[in-house]
Image (cartoon, rainbow, N blue to C red):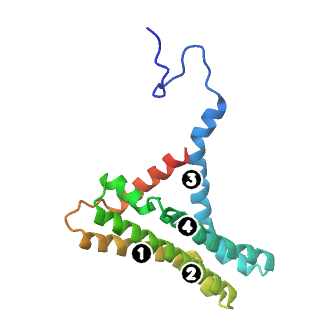
Amino acid sequence: MSPDIGPSSASPPAGERVSDSGRQHASRPSVVTGLSVAAALAYPFLAFWLPAQRQPGLGLLLFLPPVCVNLGLAWFFGRTLTSGREALITRFARLEHGQPEPRIMAYTRRLTWVWVAFFLIMAAISVALAASSAREAWVWFTAIGNYLCVAALFAIEYGYRRWRFPRKDHVSPRQQLLMLRAAFRKQCR
């Protein structure tokens, strides 16, 4: 019998070696995830510490991440709203329920627009606070407030969805986050 060398094979055929680059690629999403988490956790501390150093170049660099992250997220959600594409939140609904009903597809498309507008507003607030002399308000908003606003929108939408679609089985917010993380990891591979 010949060995199974198809795509579902767990090991290479006899005599073949696995390259180190294949192993590195498999570990890359966890390294990127780890660095992202570390940066997200470090940023609030940097946001408090750097302005106290009173060096203008450092402060300028500090203003960029919140704006860039929010604009990047707005783009990431918004690009799925172009003609002929499936809205990002519709994809998330597929993870939860398979093929959504037309009314749920319409809801998820509108909700994707809500998130685009939300991230644009968060970027605009960050820019407005950075341009003003309210440096402490900017620090609080970017280090804490922005995250609280994301959590609040997530919670409000979850409650609204449970009220709007009462007969649907809803996964918990924790399960949703785990599904999203798994989907993003799969996409990164």
Mark number, residue 73: 4
Q: How crowded is mark 4: few (under 14 residues within 10 Å), some or many (20 or more)?
A: some
- Identify which amino acid the numbered label 2 is placed on: Phe
Residue 132 at x, y = what percent?
A: 67, 90
Residue at 31% x, 51% y is 98
| Residue 80 relative to residue 34: left or right | left
Residue at 44% x, 72% y is 151
Mark 2 secondary-structure assignment:
helix
Query: Marks 4 and 3, Cα distance to the nearest angstrom?
Result: 16 Å
User: Which of pointers 4 and 3 lies earlier in the amino acid sequence?
Assistant: 3
User: Which of pointers 2 and 3 lies earlier in the amino acid sequence?
Assistant: 3
Q: Which residue lies furthest to the front in this view?
A: 83
User: Which of pointers 1 and 2 lies earlier in the amino acid sequence?
Assistant: 2
| Residue 11 relative to residue 24: left or right | left
Query: Marks 1 and 4, Cα distance to the nearest angstrom?
Result: 15 Å
Residue 94 at x, y = what percent?
A: 35, 54
Q: Which of 185 and 44 is in front in this view?
A: 185
User: Which of pointers 4 and 2 lies earlier in the amino acid sequence?
Assistant: 4
Mark number, residue 33: 3
- Identify which amino acid the numbered label 3 is placed on: Thr
Q: Name the residue under label 1.
A: 153
Whether the residues at callouts 4 and 2 have beta carbons within 8 Å, the answer is no
Q: In this view, does 103 lie above or below 145?
A: above
